[in-house]
Image (cartoon, helix red, strand yellow):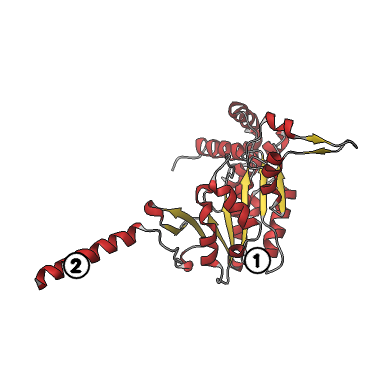
Amino acid sequence: MTHNFDQLIARAEQLMARIELALPQALSAPDWSQAVAWRYRRRAGGHGRLEPVRHVAAMELGHLKEIDGQKEKIRRNTEQFVHGQPANNVLLTGARGTGKSSLIKACLNTYASAGLRLIEVDKADLTDLPDIIEVVADRPEKFIVFCDDLSFEDGEPGYKALKSILDGSVAAATPNVLIYATSNRRHLLPEYMRENLTYTHTDDGEVHPGEGVEEKISLSERFGLWVSFYPFSQDEYLAIAAQWLASFGVATTAIEAARPEALVWALERGSRSGRVAYQFARDYAGKHATPP
């Protein structure tokens, strides 16, 4: 009888252990000395963890050309944040491939030695933002929570979670966390022609958007700093391509000779973005490199 009872207890303990593994676990702090950048990942069963980014892109502020105005705004805000001064959550919007996410990575590399850290969070995991903020709240470092290519469809749960954080919920009230997000949409939600019908007109000529439009604008307005990026002109595109070619060791005379090829490359891609200029430079430099 005693033997059977002991077996029953052992099986019950095994069952309880399996149940505990299946239940969502509190987010635990990682070894912060392992990296300056982290990714938040939610695994099967709802378990979330912070994974170190071993190799951060070696981007520097000086590498980014033709966006001096945007660069100065982000650099100044980030420097204020690192030095413990008031700073804003930031929304970087505009044309694709113009340096939005690269600028954030460059700021991380510039200020990492001063205690800046970055946590990348996918929009699907934004509902876990309060848990992430709780883990870092008492740390001496400054944390940028980075959401890349952010946009929402109607009804997505991450929308309300981010809105709550930006609105200053109790969980987000910590001076060592800011949200930096990039998006091709200024208002982060899809906009439809039919929504124009919700606008109302007053007797004195004023126009007021409907509740649906107001809701779509409200999330963007919670970011204290908006930084807009625009498509590059031909001259700006060529200047960026030349800068990347030089960084790959291409001679000045060869860079001048490569201009027509750079324009054809952009024409074939249908874009004169900084990303396209970088991709052209990699292709050209590799194609003309001296074999070992």
Q: Which residue is mark 2?
A: 10
Residue lying at 46% horizontally and 65% vertically, measured from the top left? 34
> Which percent across, then down, holds residue 126?
53, 52
Query: Which quadrant: the C terminus?
Result: top left
Rendered view: 264 above or below 148: above
Of the numbered discs 1 and 2, the one sitting upstream in the chain is: 2
The quarter holding residue 239 reads: top right
- Kind of element beneath mark 2: helix
> Which percent across, then down, holds residue 174?
62, 67
Front one among 55 and 45: 45
Front one among 277 and 182: 182
* Residue 107 visible in the displayed image: no
Q: Residues within 10 Å of mark 1 (few under 14, many from 20)?
A: many
Q: Which dot, 1 or 2, sits closer to the camera? A: 2
Front one among 237 and 166: 166
- Kind of element beneath mark 1: helix
Q: How far apart are the alpha carbons under marks 1 and 2?
A: 52 Å
Q: Which residue is mark 1?
A: 82
Horizontal arrangement in the rendering, residue 175 relative to residue 202 (left or right) = left
> Which percent across, then down, holds residue 71?
70, 52
> Which percent across, then down, holds residue 158?
55, 49
The quarter holding residue 73 reads: bottom right
